[in-house]
Amino acid sequence: MNVSAWSIRNPIPAILLFALLAFMGTLSFMAMKVQQFMDIDLPSVRVSASLPGAAPALLETEVARKIENAIASLQGIKHIYTKVQDGTATVTAEFRLEKPTQEAVDDVRDAVSRIRSDLPGDLEEPIVAKIDLTGLPILSYTVDSPRLDEEALSWFVDNTLARRLLSVPGVGAVSRVGGVDREVRIELDPDRLLALRVTAADISRQLRRIQREDSGGRADLGGAEQSVRTLATVRTAAELAELDISLSDGRRIRLGQVATVTDTIAERRSAALLDGRPVVGFEVVRSRGAGELEVAEGVRAELARLHAEHPDIEVVESFNFVDPVVENFEGSMSLLLEGAVLAVLVVWAFLRDWRATLVSATALPLSILPTFAAMYLLGFTLNVVTLLSLSLVIGVLVDDAIVEIENIMRHLRMGKTPYQAAMEAADEIGLAVIATTFTLIAVFLPTAFMSGVAGKFFVQFGWTAAIAVFVSLVVARLLTPMMAAYLLHPPRRLHDRPRWLDTVVRLSGFCVRHRWLTLLGAAGFFVGSFALVPLLPTGFLPPDDMSQTQVNLQLPPGSTLDQTLAAAEQARVLVARHPQVRLVYTTIGGGSAGGDPFVATGVQEVRKATLTIRLTPRNERRGVTKQSIERELREALTAIPGIRFTVGLAGANEKYILVLASENGQLLAEHARRVERELRTIPGIGGVTNTASLVRPELVVRPDFARAAELGVTSAAIAETLRIATSGDYDQSLPKLNLSQRQVPIVVKLPPAARQDLDLLRSLTVPGRDGPVLIGAIATLTLDSGPAEIDRYDRLRNVNFEIELNQQPLGEVEKQALALPSLRQLPPGVFQTTVGDAEVMGELFASFGLAMLTGVLCIYAVLVLLFRDFVQPATILAALVLSIPGAFLALFVTGSALSMPSMIGLIMLMGIATKNSILLIDYIILARREHGLNRWEALLDGCRKRARPIIMTTLAMGAGMLPIALGIGTDPSFRAPMAIVVIGGLITSTFLSLLVVPVVYTLVDDGIERMRRLLGRTERHVAS
């Protein structure tokens, strides 16, 4: 059934259908979430185990290796990453993508449960959780108040502000950065402890037994039932100081006799500063399924209400990952409109008929709006990937309508009525329009089934593009002919043909007459363009040009909070001098804004600081890229001695990570130093940092086993006494002061000055068989060193080298790095591997290659079904070969890298280039079969009749992508290479299709004729 003819005869159903689809699309567009990236589910699980105060070397042996061995036997495991720091071991299990995430979490939890009895008894219960890629902050604020002190302001953030913001739909978490925590500190007097023969552990243990509330039991008094509660708590620090404590030998002392009890703040382990001014910060994380825009609007509205209630509280936005989302969304909408307007102008320039232009232009909104409805039903969001997909296909959506309307206009110039012209033209062009659309769908859809992590992101890309193109086909077959039949008027001048068309026909005829010369020229162009491929840089993702960056500082192990503060302030002053820097937000020992969701950061340390920098907006710094600013910041920061630093956001795809692994930690560390020296010789790169564990100073206690056994002292007692005396007991063991809204921990330990006196620590007592014993009498205390941090990869010690690309292509840096002598000749037992972007880049290129091959096979299958021929579709596929040289040439001329966006452009180019050949070959076959023309006449007539729609559609697509290629609007770093590839390939494929495809058609046709004659002679010979 000819649907176009049916629609022309029955216009009302088509009008109602598209009115309904447009209405549904509008509602869907308004209801869709706006996100940076869609929420993807990766089967990666993180196990966090904490034992406060434990050294990394101890945790590696006692905890990390046991958890690794338990996880390694699980089905589907791909990699195991481990980071061991002071008091914390974090093990990340990465499973293969086919593993269901919940099954992976359950398997890891079961594996950890099986070995729980083998882990240290004091270890906090290991936390098993899946890695949530939405778990990074999208907004960061600082809070200040002239009325509240730091502790009150911190409690205001923890209690009032966090509770209010968590009620906002879409907010997943609110975490404080900097500030202080309230605690009741019991500072023991070492001299009095020694005089009374009492240990810090005794005091802490007795307090935990006394200061508590217990429930249990039941009473029946007065004919009613009552529950029994034991209330043995005090309300203030003063009451606590008056508390009597019984000692192990039966004596009784008042707590105030041996300690100073104060209601104060906990020891500072983190800080936040805004432009050098101390503040209390907090970060907002969105929940899974929520959109950044709606969360930001809700948070800002709630903060405005909070400020109205507390006018003395000043809240300043310090970091914002929502603005890039807004910029991308608004920029994509602008690009859609600009591309649509340019495509419509191309139609007007060729047809010079406002009615025909209106009919063609109608296809754009009526293709986009139903696509929004389908996206909403599929659960898609408006994110970078889907908006990118729509931006790229905007020029394609009008193609089918252009082909239809141009053919109808050609029939009108023959003197037919609009109704008759629409009926005949739609019937004539129908097969070609369907074939071109389904070839595009055959190209886009395989990207939705790509493997690897990148495939998770491209699911929505492939489906969005395929749906939009399919809807444009429905519009072109149902609506465009119907509107043309009732809206168009016969043109004033019949048989009007532009002069350039005759030139195209003459050139095409020349090429057909000189077939071998034409093929030789095309082959030379093809080979020459492929010779450019080795000259093209290769990369994964081009660096972005957003208005935010970071500086990460790392001081030597053992550095104090004050030393880190001084270094961070020195770095802030240097950074703030740059004319493009607007604001600097510093965090020490906390905060995760701008981090990499794929990398386990471990526990925060006081020796590490992060400077989050807000730059001037991109449109206000013309010609100055973020990468050039970062390069200047690197040069400025080299003036600070004794620090390691990196510049750039952790997840900004601007680094190359190289991994060395070995079971021999000493050999690995020695070779890592050599590799680092050679890596620094690579020209053009930024800084080189590695995770080779720096040694940290340690106070090592070595008991005399014979003496300790004689006095009845255990190693556990020594460790407990020193731990409680210097840093307090474990958090779960601390007694609490119960207030109306919170519990305040009660920490028993020595005053800070006591930790600086080695002789005083030796004089501490531990319980023995015959009474307290001095630690110095049974153990030696010496200063030593141990690893500050241990990294492991697949159950081996590893060192990660992080190389800042500094605008260098990832592939080039990787090639130069792997060619270094130290990496070509690794010592026995040391292995080299690649993680991060380089690993994903390899998987991505393989997936894209498979997607392109699948696309070609699908195109061929579609053409065979539509043309009912196995040989002539090969002629159409010649256009694919003709489009690739232009793409490579465009990349070479513009200096763009062969990266992921370039590969997307190549896939799109495959479908677009095939369209031109289909239009041409379809008419040649039609002219020979139905109009009775010979091959020469059919070739020339095909070029004459189809050159105009081919060039029109090419210019419309090119015009639609021109704003993207020129970098107009939103950040062009990712989009521009795609548009450059498509435009470059379109230019060459269009002209070569008109000139070379007819030549290929004649050669294929001659081959078919020879085969027929050969088969005919064979049949006659057999018959005779």
Image: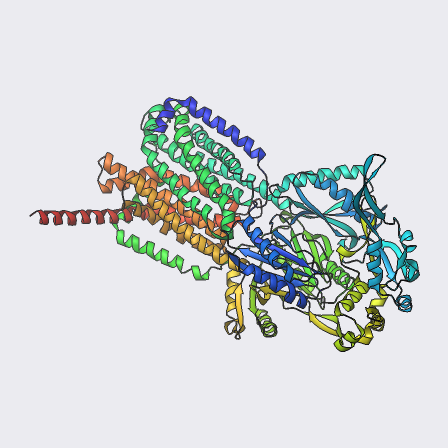
Q: Residue furthest left?
A: 1024
Relative to 27, is 724 above or below?
below
Q: Is residue 572 left or right of residue 3?
A: right
Q: Is residue 1017 left or right of residue 678?
A: left
Q: Position of residue 649 (x, y in %)?
A: 63, 55
Query: Is residue 959 visible from the viewing direction of this image?
Result: no
Quadrant into which the N terminus falls: top left
Q: Position of residue 855 (x, y in %)?
A: 39, 47
Query: Is residue 325 visible from the viewing direction of this image?
Result: yes
Which residue is pictured at 43% across the width and 44% down the height? 445
Q: Is residue 663 left or right of residue 153?
A: left
Q: Position of residue 75 (x, y in %)?
A: 51, 56
Seen from the viewer's position, the closer of residues 987 and 774 is 774
Q: Which colour scheme appears in the figure?
A: rainbow
Seen from the viewer's position, the closer of residues 55 and 768 is 768
Q: How many marks?
A: 0
Seen from the viewer's position, the closer of residues 278 and 957 is 278
Q: Position of residue 961 (x, y in %)?
A: 49, 44
Q: Is residue 781 left or right of residue 524?
A: right
